[in-house]
Image (tube, rainbow, N blue to C red):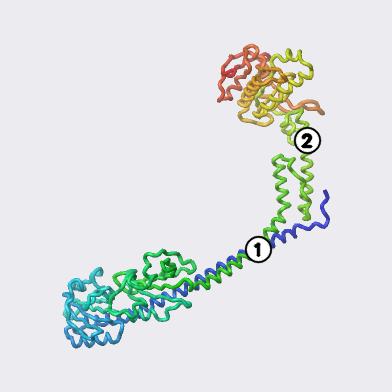
Amino acid sequence: MQIWKGSIGIATVLTLIFGGLVAVSTGALLLLSLNNAFEATRSSLGSRLETLIHDAAQQSHAFFEPMEVHARWLSQEIADGGIDPENQTRLESVLTGVVSTLPQIAAVSFQYPDGTGFFYDAQTRAMQRVVWPENWRIRLNRGEVNPQTSPRSEGIWVLRPSVMDGTPASTFIIPARTPTGDVGAVAVRVDPSPLSKSLATNATFRGYELVRFLLFNNRIVLGHPQLQNLDGVSRPSIEDLDDPYLKQLDKGERFELAIVGEIPGVETFVLQADEGERVFALMSDTSREAGGELAVGVHFDPQAGAAEFNRLISVAAIGGALLISSIMVAFFLGRRAAAPMKRLADAAQLVQNNELDRVKPLPVGSVKELAAAATAFNSMVDGLKERIKIRDLFGKYVPQDVATLLLSDDTTAEPRNTEATVLFLDIVGFSSISENLSPAAVVETMNAFFSDAVKLIEIEQGMVIQFQGDAILAVFNVPIEREDHASSAIRAALSIIETIKQQDYAGHKLECRIGINTGPLVAGAIGAHDRLSYTVYGDAVNVAARLEQMNKEFGTRILLSGSTAELVEDIPFKMIGKLPIRGRETAVDVFTLADK
């Protein structure tokens, strides 16, 4: 075949392939850009959400911090003697000033360890000397503050019953030592309305309602927009509010908020409540002691972040379409460029599997180098087919393995010394049978028998060397080496004996005798310079032939030598004896099969 003129070079094909790779690379870069955009969106939303939660925390801090400062100042003044709790006029003046300065203070009190003390109510503007019930008293020890039951030196926020009506209220308590050495405590009780009003100010996020809140132990509501008009000082729980999302804070199913990046110290999630989904952000407030866990939080409609998410989806969709298009183009070009090479590889695989009859001529394409490869390959296949024809024809006259060796450049067919197992087979009484047959019938009978015998020998990797009249000379372990050649020869002999029992050949029942021997021999191509024959010869061959003849004396069908028997472990034998062999000076151990 001739290479087409005008064929293009492989560089052109590679350019097309690299174009596809560039498309894929562009797609990968696009995906990377999308990922960066996604991370940027998460970071942006996370920063906005972090700002919202910190704003709520700042409002809480701005609400509670002044009361703590005043309580600490009052405690220090009492300890320094600047204020005498027993001087009611002076004490009332000071407490009035503290209350008027901070509208979020509902009441201020000073309590002695025995439960007595003074209480100033911001609403009535009156100070009373009171005795607190036992279970309402601040438990203090002289010279010692128990952090589990009493306020620490810097003060602590607790839910404590009001002396007026017993309702629980947020109260900041700080110890104070009087000049006489008694330890007392200053308590500042909170009015939640200003905090809740502050939390309700500008409570929107991108046009959607934003709810800020402050919780104690995740249940008691200290601040919430719904508490800004609350009368009294009672502390509702999350179940008491008309907030359907906060009510189910502990009951609703939570999902990860993937669109928002991680915010240090802040827990973000989507709450699935009965009323729908809600985005929550919670942050523990560790800036003050509270005898429990303070948490600042916000929640809002997930649609507040939908704009960024929808834009991200649109960009991802466009990018995905471009990526798919690039991949499809690259794939098409790659397949088109790779098709000739694939055909060559598939055809080479068929050649490797000796399936030349299935190899079709490769088309000569328009790529110069591939066209040259296809031409060379087609010529090679034609040569191999011709070689196989010669081998198959040659193999009808010599064994196929020998034909392959002789047709190769290898020197394996040269005579060499080796150890092998020889099988010699002869048909019993065939001379008498052939006297009554025509020459054509004799040939037909022998061919039928030899066909079965050769097939069974080759199944066990043996090779028939010669047909000697009505006899067969076969060898195992040459030219192809086989570790269990002795066992293979015995199995082949057994298969032949069993087969001829069950069949007739050209209408005749046949029997045969077999001799088997293992030993050193010479195998290779022997003969004249211009005419060779592959054969084996040596003492091992002669012994196998003598053993075949000795079957007549013992009425056996298979005899084998001791050198064969000692190589076989899985077949039982019966020893005939140590017998002399014609043509040998030493006797040979002779065995037959135990069940024969």
Q: Is residue 550 above or below residue 395?
A: above
Say which quarter of the image contains residue 437.
Answer: top right
| Residue positioned most to the top | 553
Q: Are marks 2 and 1 in contact (CB under 8 Å)?
A: no
The percent position of residue 373, horizontal first and vertical second, equals: 76, 50
What's the residue at 77%, 43% (across, down)?
Answer: 381
Q: Which of the two discs, 2 and 1, sits closer to the camera?
A: 1
Q: Please tell me which residue lies in front, 359 or 465.
A: 359
Q: Is residue 104 above or below residue 567?
A: below
Quadrant in the picture for the C terminus: top right
The amino acid type, in three-letter code, at marker 1 is Ser
Taking the image as shown, residue 469 lies to the left or right of residue 482, namely right
The percent position of residue 83, horizontal first and vertical second, equals: 21, 85
Q: Please tell me which residue lies in front, 558 or 181.
A: 558
Instruction: Please tell me whether mark 1 sits on a helix, a strand or a loop.
Output: helix
The percent position of residue 235, horizontal first and vertical second, equals: 29, 74
What residue is shown with label 1?
325
